[in-house]
Image (cartoon, coloured by chain):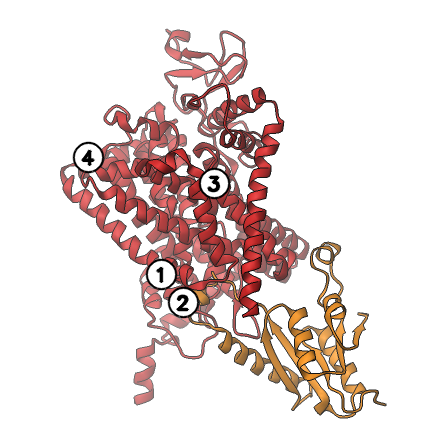
Chain colours: A orange, B red
Amino acid sequence: MNWLPRRIVVVPIDFSEASFAALETAVEMVADPSHLRVVHVLPDLEPAEPGVIWHTIDDTGREEHAAKALQAELAKRGYEGLATHVCIGDPGHEIVNYAEQLDAGLVVVPSKGKSALQRLLLGSVADRIVRLAHCPVLVLKHH
Amino acid sequence: MPKHNRFTTWYLVALLLSLTIALGGVLVAQEATPNSASQANEEQPSSVEAEAEGSLPLPAAAAPAVADEPDWMEQVDGYFGAHIVGPLYQVLFFDFWSNRWIPAGTPEEVTCPDPDCGHTHKVADLYPSSKAPIVIPCPDCGEEICTGAQVPLVVLWLFLGAIFFTLRMGFINVRGFWHAIRVTKGDYDKPGEEGEVSHFQALASALSATVGLGNIAGVAIAISLGGPGAVFWLIVAGLLGMSTKFSECTLGQLYRKVDPDGTVSGGPMRYLRDGLAEIGLKPLGVVLATIFAIVCMGGSFGGGNVFQVGQSLEMLRSQVEFLDTYPWVYGLILVVLVGVVIIGGIRRIASTAEKIVPTMCGLYVLASLYILAVNYHQIVPAFGKILSGAMSPSAMYGGFIGVMIMGIRRAAFSNEAGLGSASIAHAAAKTDEPVSEGIVALLEPFIDTVVVCTMTGLVIVVTGVYDKGLHPECAEFITDGKGAPLTAAAFSTAISWFPWILTIAVCLFAYSTLISWSYYGERCWSHLFGHKTAIVYKILFLAFVFLGSIVKAQNIIDFSDLMILSMAFPNILGVALLSGKIRRALDDYWSRLKSGEIKTAAEMEKGIES
């Protein structure tokens, strides 16, 4: 069964098991895996991080490094050849921006169990995506 | 550039918030009646001082210029001293009433600790014929005056920890020394090792957090309160601290996490949690990691922040008159300079400031050597004073134990061995051999304490500025705990314009330490609350920068010591529990090194050629 013929589905991956479970769900939903876009968002670098101070790491290098790591992890789990994208910033904003750019039909995210304090302070990434996205968002409950 | 605009907005919001927090403190202080505020202001520092130095009869805090109406800065200070420093001191520096049973030599005068009495008595008058007991009852009100040595639990803990690690690691501080220099030089670097920075860069980053006001002001404070003998204990604690530093930084590397983007995160929060879980102590690990993260944030507000701001300000004040009248202006300038980096994300400033540190260190040592050369005839007597002061100090400095405690306390404060903070920076080094980075890390207490602190110590002893009798103009610095101006006075005896250079050095050291500690604190905050809310921590950090410019020196010193030294409780306990694992890793590494399995880069090249 597929509900989304020829529409792009965005799946954010943060290397957690829950996010790969969401990818599994998304694969079942699309007609063809080529409609999937896997996205990983890196946090901004801290200005006092040793690698920043000594100019030994930069954003381009990190994006390349993370893209490789993401491809390797996907291959390990049997998803070869998926389109991936790596960007830097606030996860909620970046995922929504990316989905908007692609005119995606759906974003699939897991909702992680967070402590009450963290929820109070920042809400979850899923909350933010639901709030900001222009397309439907599928939030998977964690088991 | 929408991204840049967002940063600017955040920065402005942060600036406003931090000012609001600082002014909030003023308002809270004002709510207290003027009388009680001024009382708190005058009583608290002296009672904390008495607590800290035990038998030291320090004069009461200098009365404010306008005694009736304390201004807003004094109110904040009074509030800070009475409600934050005082209660914390009671708990964290609890000394098991050692001032009642460990003799520390009889002082000339004693002051009654009861605030309602507060009379000072000459001991010779009270006990004209017999020897005075450790606990002297006040002849006026009957309150007991304890003259014994204060052995704060945390100082004992640090010192015993350092001895334990030195023995457990088989004197790695001695046998690993030459290898440490070779690894730092890059002799053993291999291409393709994971990590962010080279061994030297990691060492320099860690040093920029430790070389700071502790080396310049802290040592001066130690000598002015503990006499020349404190230098001896400072060096001993530095040498033993090398083993502690080795242990914690090896663990930092063993349990670091390499993220998908190639960046590395490690430190006590991680090795306490994961390491202790491995040996079946998971709940303890979680508790210790959490406690560590909390006190490390405290340390980043204390020794890594207000102490740096406060002591560099004292230095500037003696040079720039304007700041003497408006010290908060300095706080504001620093808030902006730190803020643009940690919130505004402007990397170049921080990068430049941190890279200058090794050079400044070298220049400072050279200048110290010059002072020593000028006073060459004083060097041998100075060593005599240091040794005799360490072994049989006069009662004025709190006796044998008092001097020892003073030296160890300031050494730990300066080189941070046992506190775990440096392992956060060392975890970033590029290497596949965790032990090799631990070995690099043992150079840190050596450079920081055995070289730089000793230089400051020698300069102060050789020039004699710690002696109120010889240099009455320095008496004010000694009684008020203003270490940096005391060091400046020592330098100015030989080079009149040197205090200016020292002022610049001090400000740079303070700034780079602030940046480094903001990173340590941010890591701890992220460990507890996640990366996204780090902005809250950064705002708090800036608020403390401002606070540091308006709070009195003695309160700052006590608060900083409390916060930074108490990091040793969770850290040393965890590292000691994991010491078996470190020892096994060390033995494995050492045997491979001796058998020639671990090759230098040059040897590997030869191997390929042949």
The residue nearer to you, when weighing A88 against B302, is: A88
Point 29% across, 45% down: residue? B502
Asked if marks 2 and 1 touch (Cβ < 8 Å), the reply is: yes
* Horizontal side, residue B523 vs residue B223: left or right: right
- Say how many tags the image has: 4
Same chain letter for marks 2 and 3? no
Q: What element carries label 2?
A: loop
Question: Which residue is the site of mark 1?
Answer: B355
Instruction: Judge depth for marks 4 and 2 and give the one in front.
Output: 2
Question: Which residue is the site of mark 4?
Answer: B381
Q: Which chain carries label 2?
A: A
Question: Which residue is the site of mark 2?
Answer: A54
Q: Which mark is residue B548?
A: 3
Instruction: Judge depth for marks 1 and 3 and give the one in front.
Output: 3
Q: Distance between the residues labelled 3 and 4?
A: 38 Å
Q: How far apart are marks 4 and 1 (CA)?
A: 37 Å
Q: Distance between the residues labelled 4 and 2?
A: 44 Å
Which quadrant, please, contains the C terminus of chain B? bottom left
Q: Distance between the residues labelled 2 and 3?
A: 29 Å
Q: What element carries label 1?
A: helix
Point 66% across, 88% down: residue? A82
- Callout 3, which amino acid? Gly
